[in-house]
Image (spheres, grey):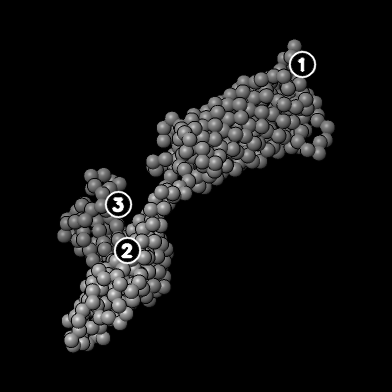
Amino acid sequence: MKKILLVSGLALSTIAFGQATFNKMSVDFGIGLNKSMSSRGAGLATNLNLPHVELGVRHMLNNKYGLKFDLGYDMYKAHKDLSAAEDFTTHYIRMNFQGILNFTNVLDFNQFYDKLGVYGHAGPGIAFHNDGSNAPAYKMDFMANFIAGITAQYKISPKLALTGDISAIAHILQNVTLDGRSKLPPSNGFDVLTANASLGLNIYLGDAAEHADWTPTNYGDAEAMAALKAKIEKAEKDMMDDDKDGVPNYLDQEPGTAGGATVDTKGKTVKVEKIVDIDGDGVLDVNDFCPTIKGTASANGCPDRDGDGIYDFVDKCPNAAGLAADGGCPVVTQKAKETMTKAMQGVQFDNGKATLIKKSLPILDEVAKVMLANPSYNLSINGHTDNVGDPAKNLQLSEDRAKAVKAYLMGKGVAENRLSAKGYGDTQPKASNATAKGKAANRRVEFLVSFEQ
């Protein structure tokens, strides 16, 4: 058991687990040129047109994949002397819902240069165009479309990136040419293909240091992992007992002890004239780390009530088995941590009172479920206020609110002896009381999990 705990503690103390946080939202804007790429677009194939304008909102699900909703506007023009039957101007508007694939992070471009990025986008949408000439044959045409494109990025700052985009748009079920003068014959596939080229900006929203676009995937440091592996292998060897004298190699000062010999706590052979076990725990005093206190053989003669291999006098949770890396306490589950954090942010009361408001009850129900599912957990409920008002009244109000939460959890079946409630008034602020935001953060109820009564 000690071997497992030592190796586990070493690994846990060397590796920090966590998920990087990053901004996910952005507003994307671009302006540029457009061009019809199909003769079914009524003679526009040779014309570059201004302007093309696009505006979108993008949400990245993670640092590789995302979703985008955008609007696009294009003005198509042609003149008599440039293949068109007549001069005309057409206004074209589209709306698309697209998927995003960030090639920068999928292919790890950022390890070469962290200011350049590329992402692809594609998705369906709808569009319409109308003819602005004097005598159109058709006023308006609605159709479906599908857009696909690629966007290059240059990072200016954590909040801004310059972009260049090239996109192709295929129309489906288009009925009228872009000049509005001819009805298109039926088509089994895409009717008209157009293209856009634009320059623009990504404006990043959020409080995190970086956006998902520029947050690389962390696959771990190969050198650090190799060093960790070497440490674990050494720890495993150190915990072995090659001479079978009951003392692990890392403590053994006499590695080649003869079989059956009596040794001291350092693995050295001792002459035993009389077998002594003062505390009567079955561990001879020469091997007993705690010779006057009754203990167990698995803990070298020291007390270890929870059997986790960590002596009671250094075990922060002597009645609940845990890991050395956590001071001998059990690991609090991730779900429990998330629930207690959510409760601290979500539990609210009537203004100036200790009465729980209705919308606080669902999260307290979740706290109760966590406590009932983990009988080894005990919960400290601590009430806090801002510095507005009389300090003595604030102290009493925080105490009453903590007790109100305790009473509610008891009503949901959590035993009273597993709950403690205390108020601290305005004595332990977590933010400055000089601002409204800081005062709001200081008006809180904290939930702390422990394992001792």
Cα–Cα gap, marks 2 and 3: 31 Å
Q: Say which of 36 and 22 sits in front.
A: 22
- State which mark lies toward you, 2 or 3: 2
* Amino acid at pointer 1: Ser
Q: Closer to the N terminus: mark 2 or mark 1? A: 1
- Which percent across, then down, holds residue 76? 67, 22
Residue visible at 81% across and 36% down in the picture: 187
| Most distant residue in the top direction | 81
Determine whether 268 is above or below 398 in the image.
Answer: below
Cα–Cα gap, marks 3 and 1: 68 Å
| Most distant residue in the right direction | 185
Q: Say which of 164 and 264 sits in front.
A: 264
Q: Say which of 30 and 450 sits in front.
A: 450
Q: Which residue is mark 2?
A: 325
Q: Quadrant of the N terminus?
A: bottom left
- Which percent across, then down, holds residue 234? 36, 61
Q: Which mark is residue 441?
A: 3
Q: For mark 1, does the 10 Å Cα neighbourhood hold few (<14), some (14 to 19), or many (20 or more) residues?
A: some
Q: Can residue 379 be seen here?
A: no
Disc 2 on helix, strand or loop?
helix
Residue visible at 40% across and 69% down in the picture: 370
Q: Which mark is residue 70?
A: none
Disc 1 on helix, strand or loop?
loop
Residue visible at 60% across and 31% down in the picture: 72
- Which percent across, then down, holds residue 359? 40, 61
Q: For mark 3, does the 10 Å Cα neighbourhood hold few (<14), some (14 to 19), or many (20 or more) residues?
A: some
Quarter of the view holding residue 100? top right
Q: Are marks 3 and 1 in contact (CB under 8 Å)?
A: no
Q: Closer to the N terminus: mark 2 or mark 3? A: 2
Q: Which residue is mark 1?
A: 83
Q: For mark 2, does the 10 Å Cα neighbourhood hold few (<14), some (14 to 19), or many (20 or more) residues?
A: some
Specify whether 154 is left or right of 285.
right
